[in-house]
Amino acid sequence: MSLLVIGSTGTLGRQVVLQALTKGYQVRCLVRNFPRANFLKDWGVELVYGDLSKPETIPPCLKGITAIIDVSTSRIDEQDALKEIDWKGKLALIEAAKIGKIEKFVFFSTQNLDQNNQIPLLKLKNGIETQLRISGIPYTIFRLTGFYQGLIEQYAIPILENLPIWVTNETTYISYMDTQDIAKFCLRALQIPQTTNQTFSLNGPKSWLSSEIINLCEQLAGQEAKVQQIPLFLLKVLSNFFSLFEWSQNISNRLAFAKILNTESNSSKFNADLYKIFKVDSSEIIQLDDYFLEYFIRLLKRLRDINFEDVQKQKNLII
């Protein structure tokens, strides 16, 4: 089976590519910026130029391809890209896939879409899900929460740099996952017939409160966090206020997205049946505390190495 991966240079995309290569798939990556994607070529990937904002570039990329894995997404604040890429571009991709008789289309979306259609990015993702379902292309849709990798910038780095961490006063449990494990589910979807034409909310085995993640980082870093709380009702008020002004649409959308991340739903809880369908043992999933432990060990080692190098330089100056 030959794969076309879209969004291959991102945090999740590169894990999908790496695991696909390991499993022996032929992998082609649609890219706009070849220098930025050169590391993929070094891995043995075929790079092909394509731009979702230029629909005419898409069909040539599908020649000889049997499955599409779309990991790409615009940022919540990239208003100009949303309509051109996440709507028009994705529609063109689906149409090209129909013409090219693609055998499987894996699409990554977001949880809690139905309750949050007021946010442009989520509204478009919901629309693309619908278009994919009625396209006739065999598909699998994964609705995700958050990545472990994103929590480093959100919690670990602010603690290390003595910066404030902003949290709401809500006790919301969220089941984050490592991108390595998400990629594992993605590739299983290509192999297991029961996953075809299905939508799955993908979550880790354990749910975490923000306070629990902060406590974990404090223990590993050996220093206290500066925690600043903002009431969820104030987040909602600010989001509604900024939505009144065209110049502040990005602020409104970012605040609304933060509100979503603090909304708990049944779909954000661990689903043992889902793991059985994909034949994944939940005990093999990377745990958040193990992920952070490895991160801090690597970081502290790097800091020791830097300190050693500085000492050696000072000795050389004295000599």
Image (cartoon, rainbow, N blue to C red):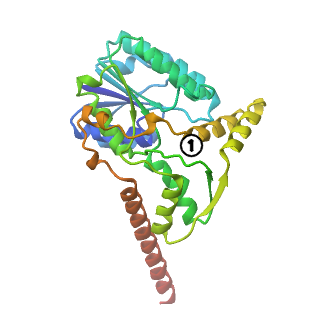
Neighbour tally class for label 1: few under 14, some 14-19, many 20 plus, Cα within 10 Å: some
Query: Would you say residue 162 is visible in this rendering?
Result: yes
Q: Look at 67% across and 48% down and name the residue there.
A: 231
Residue, far left: 24
Q: Nearer the viewer, residue 264 or 165?
A: 264
104 and 170: which is toward the camera: 170
Quadrant placement of the N terminus: top left
User: In the rendered structure, which amino acid carries the disc numbered 1?
Assistant: Asn
Give the residue furthest to the right: 245
In the picture, measured across the screen, residue 201 lies left or right of residue 25, that is right
Residue 284 in the image: above or below residue 194: below
Residue 221 x, y percent position in the rendering: 48, 68
**Residue at the disc numbered 1:** 262
Q: Can residue 144 be seen in this view?
A: no
- In the figure, is residue 203 to the left or right of 172? left
Secondary structure type for disc 1 = loop
Instruction: Please name the residue shown 48% across and 33% down the image.
Output: 111
Between 99 and 39, the one lying in front of the other is 99
Which x, y percent locates residue 301?
40, 70
Q: Classify residue 47 by image quadrant.
A: top left
Say if 103 sits above or below 244 in the image.
above
Q: Residue at x 36, y 58 (%)?
A: 290
Residue 236 found in image quarter:
top right
On screen, 82 above or below 185?
above
Residue appearing at x 26%, y 26% in the figure: 2
Q: In this view, does 51 lie to the left or right of 251?
A: left
Residue 259, position in %: x, y? 61, 40
- The spot of residue 288 in percent (x, y) is 40, 54
Q: Give the total of numbered labels.
A: 1
